[in-house]
Image (spheres, grey):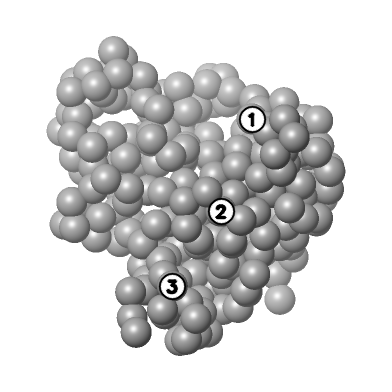
Amino acid sequence: MSAALLEVEDLRVAYGKVEAVKGVSFTVREGQVVTLIGANGAGKTTTLHTLSGLLPPAAGRVRFAGRELTGVPAHRVVALGLAHSPEGRHIFPRLTVEENLLLGAYLRGKAPDIADDLERVYVLFDRLRERRAQAAGTLSGGEQQMLAMGRALMCRPRLLMLDEPSMGLSPLMMKKIMATVAELKATGTTILLVEQNARAALALADHGHVMETGRIVLSGTGTELLHDESVRKAYLGED
């Protein structure tokens, strides 16, 4: 079994006096896709924001590649190899597609292989190649999602965190984005996925966790959770 790349132990996160994440523990191993599913407000996005250094934990431990992440600022977390493609995309609308992508490699300086990684993103998302000189704010929602994912890949992450990559997309574009996640998995990319489409997420995942009101209430392989009666009723729309 591969080593644990990410270890989250009893993580607690609060907004003032309101505890949003209440003692969450899980691991992500090299080469795995691990998904967090649950209703809005369950604490999934807050968990990702804390892992990437955007929010301070109230308690608990986070270790990445054997290093303690508590107190490490967000830009250093990225430099260590943990990249976050956030909910809502947060691209730079006035910059071109290519300028947005190159910002993803900013911390790599003038590394000679940046051009190779740019080409990899363009192979993965051919629409971005076609629009490389276009202002990012003029892209469709699906294209902006491709750009956000491509930007995260440009830092050559050891772990890629994807927060709601299919949110607000058409069914056709959602299939394209999830097919890309499957392609990344096939090439060995380690992924922590938060996704509203529980069926699609669990179908891809090696392991999954169901979050409710800040806690993990159920864990298992993707296949096990797909066939769990309570998951099917609550998250897959089945009676």
**Mark earlier in primary sequence (2, 3):** 2
Q: Which residue is mark 2?
A: 42
| Residue nearest the observer in this picture, 239 or 30 | 239
Which sits earlier in the primary sequence, circle 2 or circle 1? 2
Q: Is residue 16 left or right of residue 103?
A: right
Q: Nearer the viewer, residue 213 or 135?
A: 213
Task: Inspect this view and state whether residue 51 appears.
Answer: no
Residue 32, position as x, y percentages in the image:
57, 65
Query: Mark 3 and mark 1: span between their CA atoms?
Result: 30 Å
Residue found at the very far top of the displayed protein: 94
Residue at 30% from the left image edge and 18% from the top image edge:
93
Query: What is the crowding at mark 1: few (fewer than 14 residues within 10 Å), some, or many (at least 20)?
Result: some
Which residue is found at the position 64% from the left and 25% from the top? Answer: 75
| Occupied quadrant, residue 28 | bottom right
Q: Quadrant of residue 30?
A: bottom right
Please state if 228 lies on the left or on the right of 214 as rendered: left
> What numbered label is drawn on residue 54?
1
Name the disc covering residue 234, or none.
Answer: 3
What number is the disc on residue 162?
none
Q: Is residue 184 left or right of residue 71?
A: left
- The CA span between labels 2 and 3 is 13 Å
As helix, strand or loop, the secondary structure at mark 3 comes to: helix
**Which three-letter amino acid code belongs to the residue tagged 2?**
Ala
User: Which three-letter amino acid code belongs to the residue tagged 1?
Assistant: Leu
Question: Is residue 59 positioned above or below 187 on the image?
Answer: above
The residue lying toward the viewer, choosing from 39 and 88, is: 39
Q: Are marks 3 and 1 in contact (CB under 8 Å)?
A: no
- Earlier in the chain: of badge 3 and badge 1, it is 1
Query: Which quarter of the image is occupied by the C terminus?
Result: bottom left
